[in-house]
Image: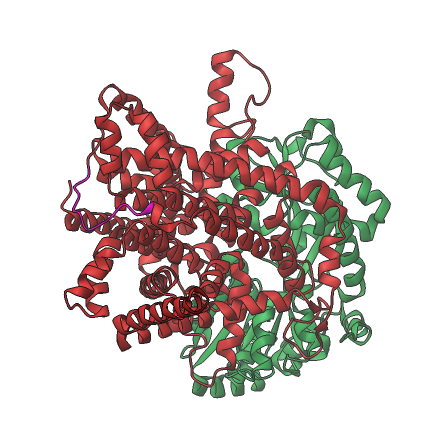
Chain colours: A green, B red
Amino acid sequence: MIRHYGTVALAVAAVFGLSSNIVRAQTAWYDLPAVKAAYEKAKEEKEVNVWTPVQAEADWIGTEFNKRFPGITVKGTGDLQAATKIIAEARANRHSVDVWQNSLGGMLEVQKRNLFAKVDWQPFGIPPGNILFEGDGVAAHNFVYSTLYARNLIKQEDLPKTWDDLLDPKWRGKMVAQDFLFPRLMGFLAIAWGEERTAKWGRAMMNDQKLLITNAPRESFLKTGERVLSIGDAVSQSFQYTENGVPTGYTVLDIVPAVQFMFSAMKNAPHPNAARLLIAWMASDEGMAAREKAVYGASIRPGSKSPLAQQVVQSKAKVILEDLATMDQRADYYKKFSSIIRGP
Amino acid sequence: MSQISLPSGAVQRARIKRAAKAEKRADIGWAGWTAIALGAAAACYFILGPLLMLLTTAFRGPQDFLPFEDGAGWTLDNLAAVYFDRNLYTTIIPNTLIFTAGSVTVTFLIAFTLAWLVERTDLPFRNGVYTIILFPLLVPGIVLSITWIFLLAPNTGWINVILRTLLGLEGSGPLNIFSMGGMILAQGIGLVPFVFLLLSAALRSMNPSLEEASNTAGASPFTTIRRVTLPVLLPGLLAPLILATLITLEQFETPLVIGFPARINVFSTRIFFELNPDTDLPAYGRAAAVALPFLICGVLLLLLYNHFIRRAESFVTVTGKGFRPMRFALGRWRLPAILFISVYALFGALLPGFVLVWASLFGYSLPSFDILSTISFAGYADLFNNPKFWLAARNTFIVAGGSAVIVTTIGVILAWTILRTQLMGRWVLDFISFLSLGIPAVIAGLASMLLYLSMPIGIYGTVLALVLAYSYRMAVSTRLTRAALMQIHAELEEASSVAGGQWLTTIRRVVLPLLRPSLVASFILLFIIGFREFTIPTILQSPDNTVLSVMMWQAFQGGKTTQAAAVGTMIVIFVIPIIFGLRRFVLARDGRD
């Protein structure tokens, strides 16, 4: 067993919440010497292979990245189970991935195997608060759990304000959730509420409120009116559903759980300089803004300039960001709550 | 004397037997032996890797190490976690049995009726009907399931809304797709084309002289089917029955999308959840442990199959005598037959097809005349302007076509070896090829990844790696060809041999033409499966070997509904002409209408 959560958790906890613009105060980040040097070398490498959980997360990168750094081909591949591939490739001493983006939890097994390049990211303009695992990774966007609603079927004033509001009988038979996301949402809520209260809430959602758990696209239920609320869905999905022809809004409830996504350069990346440059760009304000525009995902970490981050701050909601300190506890909750959701 | 003659007689018989075997070996010749050796070696190469991976993975742990990593060791923990779970026996196994039995029954009732109508009656527009019946095979399983939700969702399902209006009912229902009945209906209809393809091949290969005799004797069409067609077709019926049972056991799209909301868990959903954990690596060990019963079921079903068809000569209907098939005149049954096909076509093909095309043009907007003005071809424009789409299309044709040719070829060699030779160990080949059906695609993909990563030659990450990885699914091809070969009397090959034909000539000019319907059916099926497969190419993907199914699945996962539906529509557009063309080819060669 390779476990060294403690060290990493300390590093993350120590720097989390700190936002530093010292390095960037004087110079635009792309004029930083480290960035310029990386770009020169990256041009010689000509390409960079980036892996993301889904293809849509990778498709937008090339065009936007090349506006700032032309001459480098970005090859994007979406794979939810990339960890298996990366570990297998490393074992065979063959390497095809330069940059990997995934959730903190999803990258942990690869990080434990010491397969990420340890990089000093500060010269690239990354605030210390966004450097994870002592340089193994850089904080990306967040998957912000929310409750989405069919805009043409629910009035704004009727919307729930808290997660407990969802137990109101008026929502009985009107809610849908995804099987993968809902137990994970409960894992986050249990950090704030404790196991007993969360389990009781989950059972009430399933048994009393007749929450429909599905693997089908939730927007199809919102569109037809079969259900009007999608519970534990991401804020970013509301924009995607609207784009797909389903007018969807989101609510910021009293607790805002958020999965932390991360970029890492691989230790044996075939294109190491292009990998660093790409990560530095994606983690910059410019890259973050381009990402938010393309696939709607935003960061709500302290210091984020995204509108969603401002909205969360103004709502005074309790934010629970995915971190290593609670990783094991949430995983334990998740296993317990899964049986409530999935049945015997 | 008798005491002396007995051993002498035995020796004589042994000599005759040896001579017959030697003569048979000589008949086969070096070309035949080479083909058999290559076929057997290829089958072992393609199947043993995934099979060994499945068997070893089930006994490797702990979960935070991949089964092949240094930190992993041998363990019974996976089996204990799966088989000491009370829910397995109280819920999962009973659910799985009900779901499988129900679905296969629905499938068979519909598929046999359709196959008989198309191949044995004077039904009009048979060629078009054939293509329509196969349509659900082309539509992604997830789209078929969503179509059923649109139709039968308790609150807003179109059929429920109509029923409530007609019956004056309030509230939700009266029908609910999220139920065991809904799962059985959706899965049963979804599997019809697969079984139809196998059954129609068997019906097409069958010499109908026995049916004609029955008909001449005054038996009704129903009596003829019951007393003549079904018994003669036994191998051709059992093969799809067994294959459909195993496929339903493994199928996870319908249980996930339709069964899961009703909290109905079956074996395949358990595998899905083991492979999609929260933070840890996929629990390959436990997934393999859950999949082991598929292998055991496969072995038991194969034994059953071999038991039922042990008298192979009983099923011979194609002999040296030429035949021209007779078609039953439907007469007054023509209208009910057309109605039956129309209902199937509506739910199995037209509505899913409509949902697919509509979603590609309008996203999730509900059908109405007002919405027509918002039609958008952006999903298609994005695709056509994306070089990756054209690369994926090219790769898909290569992978689906290449693997279908390889597997069909090996299937013929194996089936012929098993039935026509006395080769020692031929039954092992039969078992190995059949067991391929019990191996989950994720395990096969994992095995291929490790194999090609460890090879010094650069196959890993290429299209060739996909062609080879897809080629482990031999059960369908071998079973289909074997069933067809059983209907062909060996006297035809003997006649060719007596006339001086070499083994290769006999196979090329006698066996293959008679097997054509089965070979084409096998190719079509494998080609379509190759187009739809997304688990293996996802595991083995690289920027250069992406295929359409992965592109569609990725778009779907990323919430790009119109783009996903556009890829799905393009898959249908690519495959339909091939099915139609192959069907025409078979008909033209058979000289039939």
- For the C terminus of chain B, the quadrant is top left
Q: Residue at x 77, y 35 (%)?
A: A204
When asked about the image quadrant of residue B265, the answer is top right
Between A340 and A7, the one lying in front of the other is: A340
Q: Is residue B529 above or below residue B403?
A: above
Indicate whether residue B433 is drawn in magenta.
no
Q: Residue at x 52, y 67 (%)?
A: B50
Q: Position of residue B441 (x, y in %)?
A: 51, 60
Q: Please tell me whether residue B316 belongs to the stretch shown in magenta.
A: yes
Q: Which is nearer the eye, A208 or B371?
A: A208
Query: Along the horizontal axis of the image, is B122 left or right of B299?
Result: left
* Above-or-below relation of B154 to A221: above
Res. B178 in view: no
Q: Main secondary structure of the magenta part?
A: loop
Residue furthest front in the image: B1
Q: In which quarter of the view is residue B206 placed?
A: top left
Does residue B457 appear anywhere in the picture? Answer: yes
Bounds of the magenta span?
A: B315-325
Q: x, y (%) of residue A184?
A: 71, 52
Of A289 and A279, nearer the camera is A279
Residue A32, position as x, y percentages in the image: 57, 83
**A206 with respect to B417 (left or right):** right
Q: Residue at x 30, y 42 (%)?
A: B203
**Residue B163 versus residue B363 in the image, above or below:** above
Measuring from the top left, give residue B115's x and y in whole percent. Answer: 32, 38
